[in-house]
Image (cartoon, coloured by chain):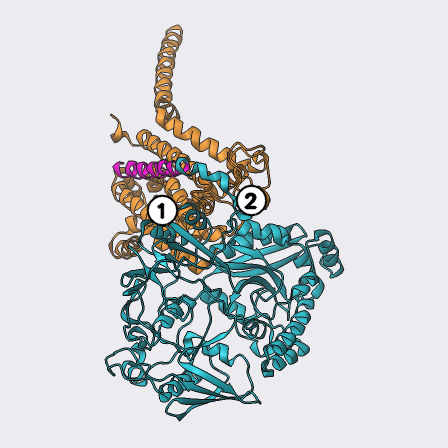
Chain colours: A orange, B cyan
Amino acid sequence: MADITKTTSADALGLDAQAEMLKTERRANNVWNKLKRNKTAMIGLVIVVVMVFIAVFAPVLAPYDPNEIHPLDAFLKPFSEGHIFGTDQFGRDLLSRVIYGARVSLIVAAGGTLVGGVIGVLLGLIAGFMGGIVDSVIMRIMDGFLSFPFVLLSIILMTVLGQGLINVIIAIGIGNIPSFARVVRGEVHIVKNEEYCNACRVIGVSNTRLLFTHILPNAISPIIVYATLNVASAIISEAALSFLGLGIAAPTASWGSILREGKSSLTTAPFVATISGAFILITVLGFNLFGDGIRDVLDPKMKQ
Amino acid sequence: MKKRFLALALVASMCVSLAACGNSGSKETEGTAANSSASETTASGQTEAEGDPVKGGTLTISLSASPSKLDPIHYSGTYESQIIKEVCDTLIEYNSDLSEYVPALATDWTVSDDGITYVFNIRQGVKFQKGKYQDGREMTAEDVAYSLNRSGELSDSNRLSMLDKAEATGDYEVTCTLKSANSSFLTALTDGGNAIVPKEEVEGWGDDFGSHLIGTGPFAMESFQLDQQAVLKKNADYWMGEPNLDEVIFKVITDSTQAANALQTGEVDIAMDLKGESVQKVKDNADLTLLETPGLHVAYVYFNMEQGPTADIKVRKALIEAVNVEEMVSSLYKYGEAQNASLPLPPGSWGYDASLESKVPGYDPEDAKKLLAEAGYGDGLTLDLYISDTEVRQNMAVLLQAYWAQVGVTLNIHASEWGTFSEVAMSNNADVYGMSWTWYPDPYFFLNKLFSTEEWGGIGNGQHYSNAKVDELLQKALEATEQSDRADYYKQALALIVDDLPGLFYANENVIYGVDGRVHDFIQRADGTIKLVTPENNVWVTD
């Protein structure tokens, strides 16, 4: 009895230590902790978090109604009394417009990525998994989409759909579908021939179950990386559409529409375009740094 | 990875360059809004004519839209008529301040007492430019009759719809018979759409005649490239005398900023239709002259008179009272490119009556709210506004939206390209429309086109304005022959129209050109047409 107890406690002690070691190692290799060690990724994350915070709390943060006009106070320079960023051509407070613009720009970027991501991932999964004729048909259609320059495709869609928040999201979303499908299809091709997938097939797991509970989770990391980086390009797409006057209807502010309005006063009031352009730049930079960081963490092959 | 950093670098450099613009432009930011609109409106309509005219040289003019149809009966925009009116002549012309008719291809004319028959004596010895189908033969009464009948029957824009027939009644005499008395006939004859063209060329080229336009004008068409440029060479045999210029090039530059830049670099000598910041740019440049003259132009917002909330005059009054026109105009035209307006007729028209200005409701948002409540819209009201997608119209819409929001009116803005807009506006499918109108000083071209019941379904009276008394007065004005009588009728009609509050008429835009210092003897006209050789001037350039 005593012997047994002794051995058990000794074993237990060893196991505990082992478990402790394992835990430490896991913690160190935990995605978040790895990410924390990546300084540029953290800078990106901070920028992203700040921008999201600004967008979410826009009504609290903005000092004025972004659409309130004061035609006689047009083009007040930055740091004028009550207007840190100055005012635009209608005397609207630029700070408030940039803050509310963050909302529109981020919603459109995230929404567009989500729409494109969901549809693209589904198509990619099906194409990669089924292979053969289904694969060819889906991917050739995707190639067809890709043969249009992205902006041209969005412009055509916006002209057909008309202005509006939902329509911009749809336009950018549709433009995003093919690249998501490509990324996912490639990944599925690798994953579907893994041992565990063959094992699943052997024990009679249904295709749907195999696809969504085994293949998708194992193909998710490139999707996350691609989606994060894609938000950045979606912000630029939204700005491009708004700049061309095809984005959100006036007077709603988005960074692109502020840039557009600033264009006609580049020599008299350059700050209008500069400030909104700077916000686009910083946010895009943030998402790119963060996305790069995530990739470094999720993709072991990228380790130096 | 590499690609993305490249993209980032590009964005970064874009922002840096924007910031660089910021530095160089910062001294100018002081001279914005309030300052510039009030102070220096150097309104002069002419460049100096001193010194001896120099023969030769090329004049380059930028057009703000791309001309495509140069056949007189098919043209639709003023930018097209600029070219037509250099290549071709009309029977009669306006003088440069548009105050009276002057003879052109017709030397004189008589009107019958009933105002139906016009007899024109045609100038002798005028030769057409050489073309593929004739070698510069003399223009005759037959050509005049042919051209006028052609326009009367085929003009896309009904530019001579009042004409019944034109006949050559002598070697140098043409008799025109109208369908009914119409005093706007002579004005219509000054239009480039009713220019005199040779039959052989028209029939020889067929649908291609526009690209090989032939007339009797001071310059002959050398080449025409769609969306690029039209090159004209001087017609040394011009009946009015030899033009000073050797060559005239009309270049298409649609963006006002680009046009101003082209003017600064010397790429063009005259930049037309300048707007916004480019006005200031030209003003600041000592080598350039800014020509600015009040245009025959009205910018307005008009209401659906037939259906919807705006069919109620109380709502219309409230909507007008909710807008601070003075503030709006100073915001839209920061460089003084327009004057405040209140009537549907520009002050430059001889039917204008300043005493009516006070009848238009002024800015009074409190009263507007009261009126809306009385009309049953105390809880708010949603309206749809249609505009074409030009910058000045879109800015106007944003301001209108803000003003109307203050009295509880929600405005949805629908901006589309001109084709879609004009379709909606002609079919009267919305509540409010924003547009502008510009034509001749004859009030007919404003009041009849905008308010006559006959014009329902046209772009002018798409709102379905109809007032039997106004129709009657407008008809009387057409039948009267004396200008003073006609002005009287138009003023009476205008008074009735103003009482009906059919729209908010907010601005008269100026005609603004930037002109290089090397251009001499150039006269700007309020209707925006460019005439390089007239009895009053013959433009010349120095190097």
Amino acid at pointer 1 = Val
**Dominant secondary structure of the magenta stretch?**
helix
Residue at 43% x, 63% y is B523
Q: Is residue A186 left or right of residue A267?
A: left
Residue holding disc 2: B34
Q: Is residue B210 visible?
A: yes
Q: Residues within 10 Å of mark 2 (few under 14, many from 20)?
A: some
Q: Position of residue B465 (x, y in %)?
A: 62, 72
Q: What residue occupies the far bottom of the structure in this picture?
A: B169
Residue holding disc 1: A121
Residue at 35% x, 42% y is A216
Q: Is residue B221 left or right of residue A269?
A: left
Q: Position of residue A163 (x, y in %)?
A: 48, 55
Question: Which of the two residues, A64 or A103, is positioned nearer the viewer here?
Answer: A64
Report, in whole angstroms, how far the alpha carbon at label 2 lies from the one at label 1. Answer: 55 Å
Position of residue B10 relative to residue B504, above or below, is above
Q: Secondary structure at mark 1?
A: helix
Q: Are marks 2 and 1 in contact (CB under 8 Å)?
A: no
Q: Chain of mark 1?
A: A
Question: Which of the two residues, B489 or A287, is positioned nearer the viewer here?
Answer: B489
